Image (tube, rainbow, N blue to C red):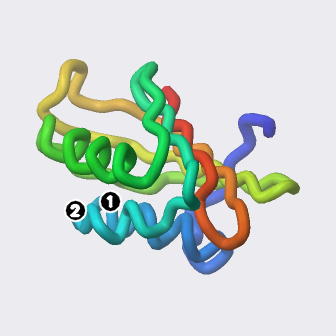
Amino acid sequence: MNDTFTAYDPATLPAPVVAYLDAHDEKRYADVAALFAPGATVLDDGKTYRGIEAIRAWSEKSSAEYTYTSTRTGQQAADGGQVTVRVRLDGNFPGGTVLLRYRFTLRAGLIGDLAIEV
């Protein structure tokens, strides 16, 4: 994928991507975990979480660590079920603001892999 993002438009994104972002923002951890395929992985902050239970635990921990707001600012899609959503976080973590890329790989209507990158 290149670095060209279009404006965030949930109507043009696959349903599991939007459902994940909404559930994560609303701290609905069981709903977050249910969107991942068995054997899925999440890569976040240099650590890999594999499997639905590990992903659920990661989701709960990562949401509780700091207080923040998230703003979806852009998106891009590629062939092969890959979607990237750019998200700005503003909160009480070091630096106060970060722009992240949530890179999703979809498999059979579920999230197969998610990498969260700066």
Residue 19's x, y, as percent? 46, 72
The residue sitting at the bottom extreme is 11
Checking the image for residue 58, the label placed there is: none
**Relative depth, front residue between 87 and 19:** 19
Q: Please determine whether, in this image, residue 86 is positioned above or below residue 13.
A: above
Dot 1 amino acid type: His
Circle 2 Cα neighbour tier, 10 Å, few/some/many (<14 / 14–19 / ≥20): some
**Relative depth, front residue between 15 and 52:** 52
Q: Please determine whether, in this image, residue 51 is positioned above or below residue 28.
A: above
Residue 91's x, y, as percent? 18, 38
**Residue drawn at the location 44% of the way across and 36% of the way down:** 49
Which residue is under mark 1? 24
Which quadrant would the N terminus be assigned to in this image?
top right
Q: Please determine whether, in this image, residue 116 is positioned above or below residue 7.
A: above
**Residue drawn at the location 61% of the way across and 66% of the way down:** 110
> Are the two marked residues, 2 and 1, in contact with CB atoms closer than 8 angstroms?
yes
Q: Left of 62 or right of it: where is 79?
A: right
**Residue drawn at the location 43% of the way across and 54% of the way down:** 52
Dot 2 amino acid type: Lys
Q: For the residues marked 2 and 1, what is the alpha-carbon distance in whole angstroms?
A: 5 Å
**Relative depth, front residue between 87 and 62:** 62
What kind of element bears circle 2?
loop
Which residue is under mark 2? 27
Q: Left of 104 or right of it: where is 31?
A: left
Quarter of the image for residue 44 reads top left
